[in-house]
Amino acid sequence: MPIGRSLAFVLAGMLAIAPALSSQAQEKYPSKPVRVLVGVNPGGATDVLARIVAHQLSDAMDGNFVVENRPGAGGTIAANEAAKAQADGSTLLLSAPTVMVVSPYLYKNLPFSPKEDFAPVSLVGAGPLVLAVNSSVPARDLPELMRYLRDNPGKVSFGSGGQGTASHLTAELFGSRAGVEIVHVPYRGDGQALNDLLGGHVQLMFTAFSLLEPHVDAGKLRILATTALDRPSSVPQLPSLHESGLTGFESFGWIGLYAPKGTPAGIIDQLNNAWQERSRRPDVRKQLEAFGGTFPAVDTPAAFAAFQAQEAERWASVIQDAGVTAE
């Protein structure tokens, strides 16, 4: 074969494989540091979970995932920044449902759309709450508490981590289902609400068991029920609101990982697969269980999107009936 023709064949072959090589190069992710935005101050439960996620993704994907805190406005500052970031996987958002489910009801002029501006990546974890009362409340179980609340309408207050948080909406749902009138006192985080629950300034609260356990052991608080349908394996002695008379009552807090809408599906799948694999490891599972994780069967981006839609439907009427608005 003449040299000219041979060279032509070689060049044609190189041109044929060039797109494939270019595509492979583009698929390498992450090629630069990835910001994980969190709408809370450092040190809280959501921040700690974000750092667990960032560490595990960094290790699993041979990258550098860095948590950046953007507190304020109920998490919407972080979400707004993430929504407007470049959709190349270099910016992610780790958020609670306060932003992704509740914020459209709280803010009239929300600068982003949870539904239109974000692509769900993965559910990071979910866990039930528990109902706790100050030791001065004359109730040892849920039926006694409900009788007490009905005898004292509008005289008993509950603390929450803020407007639209899981602790707030769960208490509103409880009041509605139980037919009792309780007064909401919002705080900037469950930790502040817990301090006033311990001091007797509010009488009851829904929050994570891990936050309350030391104070229960000290006799300062009593836990009356869990918001899971079934008794948690970690506290099997604790009845559910469902079995205590509020049939079908269920509520839990959850945290999810999101990317700006338009992020390539391949990147979203890589992130989801990496987290799913890591979250099943015993050492990581133990870390998550410390936050009350129950790990529902939500293991793909599509399943997470469906889960979020169900949560939005679940809470819409509660939010509207309670007249939840921004603080």
Image (cartoon, rainbow, N blue to C red):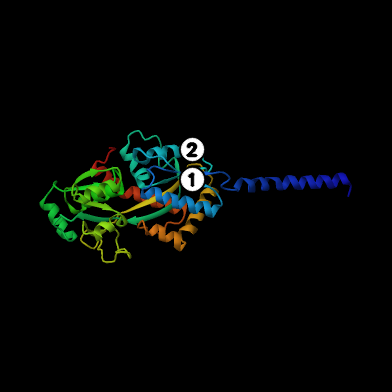
Q: Residue furthest right?
A: 2
Q: Nearer the viewer, residue 140 or 311?
A: 140
Q: 128 above or below 236?
A: above
Tag 2: amino acid: Ala
Is residue 13 found left or right of 4 in the rendered image?
Answer: left
Q: Residue 177 at what x, y percent from top left?
A: 21, 53
Tag 1: amino acid: Val
Q: Residue at position x 39%, y 52% from top?
A: 307
Whether residue 241 appears in this view of the structure is: no
Q: Which mark is residue 85?
A: 2
Q: Residue at position x 56%, y 47% from top?
A: 30
CA separation in Å, label 1 and label 2: 15 Å
Is residue 23 found left or right of 277 in the rendered image?
Answer: right
Residue under circle 1?
66
Quarter of the rendering containing residue 292? bottom left
Q: Residue 303 at what x, y percent from top left?
A: 43, 54
Q: SS at mark 2?
A: loop
Q: SS at mark 1?
A: strand
